[in-house]
Image: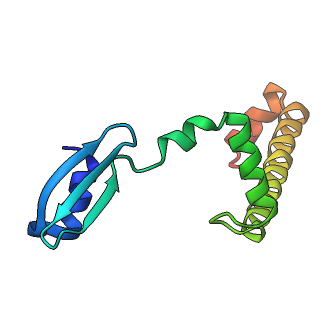
């Protein structure tokens, strides 16, 4: 069953007299009891629009939406998360650097044995 039929059944239920498929435009068309006509797409997204855009064009549109602040997540939220990520990366680098320094400084066998045996 095409998606358009589900949509039209949800909209109109038993008031539908006839349903036809417009395969060229990917639509389902319903004629109702009162003579009116309704249609619904058989796809969740417009395939023709999606196929017309290359990945580079989609990325360009996304960058334009970001600069115009039209995304679902605001620019301020993105900037805040970038700051948190940068701080976390810097803190991780400092901790790893400190551990590396400690291993090279105190890495001889006698010192390591001393630290482990004395509960350092």
Q: Position of residue 55 (x, y in %)?
A: 67, 35
Above or below: residue 70 compared with residue 62: below
103 to 60, vertically: above or below: above
Q: Looking at the image, how many numbered discs can be counted on the residues?
A: 0
Along the horizontal axis of the image, is 71 left or right of 4? right
* Farthest top residue in view: 109
Give how far across and how far down residue 108 sits, in percent.
84, 27
Task: State which quadrant residue 65 falls in.
Answer: bottom right
Identify the residue shown where x is 23% and y is 61%.
8
Residue ID at (82%, 58%): 87
Where residue 113 appears, as percent x and y from the top left, is 73, 33
Q: Is residue 54 visible?
A: yes
Left or right: 109 in relation to 39: right
Q: Quick one: 58 or 12, which is closer to the camera?
A: 12
The answer to whether residue 57 is above or below residue 35 is above
Q: Position of residue 95 (x, y in %)?
A: 81, 48
Q: Name the foreground residue: 3 vs 32.
A: 32
The one nearer the camera, 111 or 95, is 95
């Amino acid at each position: 069953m095409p998606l358009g039929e589900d949509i039209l059944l949800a909209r109109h239920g038993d008031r539908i007299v006839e349903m036809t498929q417009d395969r060229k435009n990917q639509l389902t068309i319903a004629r109702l009891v009162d003579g009116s006509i309704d249609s619904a797409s058989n796809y969740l997204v417009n395939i023709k629009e999606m196929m017309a855009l290359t990945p580079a064009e989609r990325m360009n549109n996304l960058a334009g939406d970001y600069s115009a602040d039209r995304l679902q997540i605001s620019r301020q939220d993105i900037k805040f998360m970038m700051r948190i990520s940068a701080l976390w990366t810097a803190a991780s680098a400092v901790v790893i650097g400190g551990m590396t320094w400690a291993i090279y400084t105190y890495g001889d066998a006698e010192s390591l044995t001393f630290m482990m045996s004395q509960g350092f």
